[in-house]
Image (tube, rainbow, N blue to C red):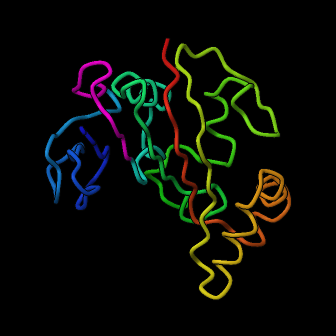
């Protein structure tokens, strides 16, 4: 199984090939994914992991398309990014974009989206969303309760993001995706 960790920095995902723009820590391959893409052939990667990387890229659609290109049709993608309500999401000047519960739904055909439908934009690549998870880590006593309640159904996730985000900021979101390939 070939696994890559894009933007791994000092620590990479276990048994993965670490990619980053500069040589630090666990980086195996130095590459500028944002401008030049991924240095792998089409459909060669089984698992893509990226944690706190996508918020830094300028060419978001290009990078996501590159991930789609290299992952095998039966491969899996695990994306972790800061939630837009996390104060660090918008105070870090290196962050180029913000993420909400429905961000990757825009890359998913409507029949693969949950209860709330968002527009399906005209990208030539699509994903099936396997799971979305809001992650609360700044509330030690109640974080497990929040994680359980707000991830128990699409309805509770929608209620959280529509009405409660700035009262109880969420730290990050995890998306588990599968590529839809022709």
Query: How far from the left and from the top, in percent, is residue 128?
Result: 59, 31
| Residues shaded magenta | 37-49
Residue 173 in which image quadrant: bottom right
Could you say where residue 159 lies in the image, as x and y percent from the top left?
A: 84, 57
State the residue at coordinates (27%, 42%).
Answer: 3
Relative to residue 36, is residue 138 drawn left or right?
right
Q: Is residue 45 one of those drawn in magenta?
A: yes
Among the 4 quarters of the image, the one containing residue 31: top left
Quadrant of the rendering where the N terminus is positioned: top left
- How many marks overall? 0
Within the image, what quadrant is residue 122 found in? top right
User: Magenta stretch: residue 46 in it?
Assistant: yes
Residue pictured at 64% horizontal, 88% vertical:
141
Residue 107 versus residue 148: which sits nearer the camera?
148
Vertical side of 127 occupied by 51: above or below: below
Compared to 46, does 6 lie above or below? Answer: below
Q: Is residue 44 left or right of residue 52?
A: left
Q: Residue at x 58, y 66 (%)?
A: 171
Tell me where residue 107 appears, x and y as whole percent.
Answer: 61, 27
Q: Is residue 149 above or below residue 75?
A: below
Q: Where residue 80 appears, x then y in whole percent?
A: 48, 52
| Magenta span main SS | loop
């Amino acid at each position: 199984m070939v696994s890559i960790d894009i933007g791994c920095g000092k620590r990479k995902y276990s048994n993965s090939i670490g990619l980053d723009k500069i040589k630090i820590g666990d980086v195996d391959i130095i590459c500028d994914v944002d401008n030049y893409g991924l240095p792998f052939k089409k459909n060669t990667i089984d698992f893509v992991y990226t944690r706190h990387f996508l918020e830094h890229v300028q060419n978001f659609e290009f990078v996501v398309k590159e991930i789609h290109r290299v992952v095998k049709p039966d491969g899996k993608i695990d994306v972790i990014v800061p939630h837009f309500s996390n104060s660090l999401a918008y105070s870090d000047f290196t962050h180029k974009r913000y993420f909400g519960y429905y961000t990757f739904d825009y890359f998913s055909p409507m029949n693969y989206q949950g209860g709330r439908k968002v527009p399906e934009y005209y990208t030539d690549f699509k994903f099936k969303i396997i799971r979305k998870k809001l992650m609360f880590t700044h509330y030690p006593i109640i974080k497990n309760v929040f994680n359980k309640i707000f991830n128990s159904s699409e309805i509770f996730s929608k209620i959280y993001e529509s009405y409660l985000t700035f009262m109880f900021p969420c730290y990050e979101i995890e998306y588990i995706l599968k590529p839809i390939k022709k």
